[in-house]
Structures are given as structure tokens and as C-alpha cells.
Image (cartoon, helix red, strand yellow):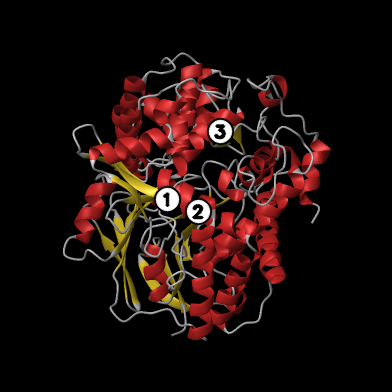
Amino acid sequence: MNDKIYRADLSTLKAWIEDVPENLNSLGGRGLTSAVVASEVEPLCHPLGKNNKLVFAPGLLSGTTAANTGRLSAGGKSPLTKGIKESNSGGTSAQLFARAGIKALIIEGLPENKNEYYGIRIRKDSIEIEKTHLWGKGNFETIEALSKGNEKCGVISIGVAGEMKMAAANISVKDPQGKIRSLGRGGLGAVMGSKHIKYVVVEPSENDQVHVEDPVKFKEAAKKFAKALMAHPVSGEGLPTYGTNILTNVLHEAGGLPTRNFSSGNFEGHDKISGETMHDLIEERGGKVKHGCHAGCVIQCSQVYNDKDGNYLTSGFEYETIWATGANCGISDLDSLAYADNLMDDIGIDTIETGAAVAVAMEAGVLEFGDSKGFVKIVEQDIKNGTPLGRIIGAGAEVTGKVFGVTRVPVVKGQALPAYDPRAVKGIGITYATSPMGADHTAGYSVTSNILSVGGFIDPLKKEGQIELSRNLQIATASLDTAGLCIFTAFAILDNAEAMEAIVDMLNAKSGSSITGDDVMSLGASVLKMEREFNKRAGFNEKDDRLPEFFSLEKCPPHNVIWDFTDEEIDSFWNF
């Protein structure tokens, strides 16, 4: 079976299947979405206009039997950063795409009729655009309606935030439990909404399988890879037990837990919202301490969180969300944060950007730090209904700061910083500054060496080694994203050479190629440079690779450190 590109043009309401150009054959995931955006999207176009495109692509290993390869990439020009954007997620769609031979889905154009709304339905060897009555519905209702009688289908959808084209709107992906994983960052939900697309449904075919050139070698390599993941103390023990929220106490102790809009690195309520506390509550209330965001996940860092009466409240309750809506807003009520998380899943809005925007509004006195009821009200009433305040928050932290006249606005390239203070975790600061994606922890997760001593230790409070660390991790991450691998596989890869060897062996066994580890890293470097070149053509320059001024002026307690990299040092990142 030869892979194909599926394309839908909303301007003509026509959809078709085409061959994969030769230059794209060796790409998948992020490498493929960024290549399509770089070659087909005018860099200066309006992100919500007809010339932007939305691209979905499974990774090179997606759909195979290999562990933790079920990641789906989405790409386009971001309405939040105005640059190139790739966001990736778990769920069921990546594997269904890959098994159906769908190399990528490209959605382009804008419909002429502004009062009609559509979905895209993909069956084996067919794609069609259909009218829908689900516009205006939440993600949960949309997924339920589309899955009725077809529970194994994949669903990619937007909520009302995407329909209103809010710059912080995300795209939801149905997971194996029928709940939601999120293509969270960069506002790609607004791009989908601008094209009047409510959903993409992928209907599975019973006999679809990914072709593997050498099944025996692939099976051996996949077994070695899974063994390495389970043997590592982080991916095999810490994350399955406490989820990503294990980091709340860790970052608090390190003095790098951003608190009350990045005014401190410590949060006095950290223990009330920690992974350890959450683990105990989940067990007490009959939830699930762990489950996978996609089939084949052996790490299983997600969970099901119930309320005090044992009723479902949310799932996939992650550290970044708990930090953004918790410590960053001075809120230590875990149940309120879980309720808000579920609301934001249904509305379809990025929890990191929303938490950051609300914290900026708190800085301005719109509501008090620690006001959990006020936070929930903003989500449940203002954002959901598109009130003026909801529109401001839904536009992201940068816009919120401008509207309310705040000077401490933690964004890079228009995107809010995630859950690590760059003054106390300096390697992640380099990633925030230089990533073509805007502030994004997943682009080059230096917390590995800075905080967790994975892949060696580099002092998070000192400048030495941070640029090289971030550079190596950003290159490696671009490769992992292209392969369709979960970022948390990096823990094993950094500490166990056999894990990286297994990835190379799987790629070769699948395609019949003979690439090396150096080839994989070269691929990551080429993806980064391609993304940076798009941003340059979109008007970006070196001055966009900077953290906000306040990080250099305000000391971060408890270490009382500042961001002290020179412009020349930051710019040296790109010397490769």
C-alpha cells in the first residue's frame, strides 16, 4: 500500500487523494507538517485567511506495534505567534491515519458561504466534505455524536473557542477512552474554525495495517525500545505512578515553579496540588492512577480524576495545566482546577495560554490571585460565551497584557511561557527564546539535565552548557516529533544508547532504509532550520529570540536570580 496525501479545499468544497511528492516520502509528523507549511503557505498571509493551511500528519512510526508511537502532528501558520506552528497529541487518530495509508491531511481555502459549516469524513480510499449540525456544540458532545455506533472511529474536533477563532483555541483528539487529548498550543483550533471545519472523522478499516519491510527486525527493535522505556526510573516508575504532575513538588524545591504570574519560584500551596496528593486522591475516590493517551503507550502518565463523591471530573490532568491554573494563579484547590480543566477540554482552549492570560489579568487586578471561583467563571461564562473579557483572555496572555497595561507578560513570539521559570532553569529559557514555535517546553526539554539529572547534570542556575543543551535537545525533539514518538521517550534515550539504536533500527526495518543515528539528528536539524526560515520570511528576526525584559530586571525568589544571557550568546544557538 502506497501512502497518499488527502486534501480538502473549502473554497470549492472538493476533496481528493493525491500521490506523495518524492521530497516528502521520508518525512512524517512534525517534519512533514512543517515541510508542507513551508512550501505551500505564504509566510506573510493572515493566519485566519484563505492562504493558510492546516496540516495533520502521523509520525513515521505511527500505526506500528512500537511503544509510544501514536502521536499526531498538526501544523499551520499560528494566529498566536504569526509564525510556523507544530503541535502534537496522543489519541487514536494518528494510528488510524497511518494504517489507512494517509501520509497527511491538508485542509485549505475558505468557504464562500459564511453560514454553512462542515466536517471531513475519511474512509478507506475516500475523503468527503459534509455539512454538519454540530457547530456550536462542545467537544464532548461532538465526539459522542460522531462515535455513536462507530466507537472505534477517530475524531479530531474543535470546541466553541475554535469556532469563535480565539487565538488560544486548540484542537481536540479523541483518545481510546473516548475522552480528549489536545493539539494544544499556537491557536490551530482558530485556523480550523476559520475554515468552518468542526471535525475530521477517520473511519477504521478492519484489515488496515502499516507495511513493514522487515517484520522480524522491527519486532526485535520494538521490544528493545519498550524494555528501555520501562527500565528508566522516570518513564518506567515516576511518570506511571504520579503522572506529569510529579513535577510540581520537584520544581518548587528547585525554586523554578512560576508562581503568581512569574513573581516567584516557590508556591506555598504546592503540596495541595502536587502529583503525590493527586495520586492519593485518585486512589481514594476510585479513579485511575494511570492510563495511556494512545494505544501502545507503556509509560501511561495520564489518569482519571474523580470528585469527592467519586464522580468523573477530568482525565489527562497534566502538570502544565495544574501549574498554569494553579501556582501561576495562586490557586491551590485541586478540585477547582480539575473542573476548569474539563471545561477547557470541552470549550477547546489551551490550558497553558488560558492560565497565563488569567494570571496576567490577576496582575492587573481584574480578579485576585487565588480566586478559584473567579477563574472558573471566566472559563465557564466569559470564554464559553465569548463576552468581551472572554475574548480578551481567549486571545492569549500577550493581548491580555496589552489590554490591561501589564508589564510582566511572560510570552515569547506571542506565546505564553510554560511551567518553568527561565531564571531558575536557564536551559529551558534558551529553548523558550530560540524555538521557532514560540515559548514551548516540549521543543527542547532541558528540565531533563537541569532538574532531573537525566543525560547528565547541568546546573540550572548557571549559564555554562545551557545553549548546547537546548540546541541538542531541540534537534533531537524535532526528530522524535517527526517519528511520531512521545517526548517522554527522551528520558530513556538520553540515558541508554540502546534506546536510540532501537529507534534507528525500527525506522530502517519499517522502510527498508539504512540510516544512522547521525542521519536522524541531521533530519532534526534540517526541520529546525526549515521552520526558522519560514519565520524569517514571515518577518521574524533575531530580536524575536528574546525573553521579556522583566526576566532580566526582576530577581526570582528564592534564588534571587535573573535572566543574564547576552543577545550574542542567545544568537549563537543557531551556529550549527
Q: Which of marks 3 and 2 is nearer the N terminus?
A: 2
Measured Cα–Cα span from mark 3 to mark 2? 18 Å
Residue 412 x %, y %: 62, 36
Residue tagged 2: 235
Residue tagged 3: 251
Q: Do the residues labelled 2 and 1 touch (CB within 8 Å)?
A: yes
Measured Cα–Cα span from mark 1 to mark 3? 18 Å
Comparing marks 1 and 3, which lies closer to the viewer? 1
Observer-nearest of 478 and 549? 478
Q: How crowded is mark 3: few (under 14 residues within 10 Å), some or many (20 or more)?
A: many
Instruction: Look at label 1 and name its amino acid.
Output: Pro
Residue drawn 66% across the image and 45% down it = 449
Residue 144, by quadrant, is bottom left
Q: Is residue 482 above or below residue 77?
A: below
Q: Which of marks 2 and 1 is nearer the N terminus?
A: 2
Residue drawn 47% across the image and 79% down it = 3
**In the image, farthest residue toward the right:** 568
The quadrant in which the C terminus is found is bottom right
Q: Does 91 sit left or right of 40 as displayed?
A: left
Residue 162, by quadrant, is top left
Residue 574 x %, y %: 77, 51
Instruction: Look at label 3 and name its amino acid.
Output: Leu
The secondary structure type at the circle numbered 3 is helix
Instruction: Look at label 2 and name its amino acid.
Output: Ser
Q: Please tell me the numbered disc located at residue 240.
A: 1
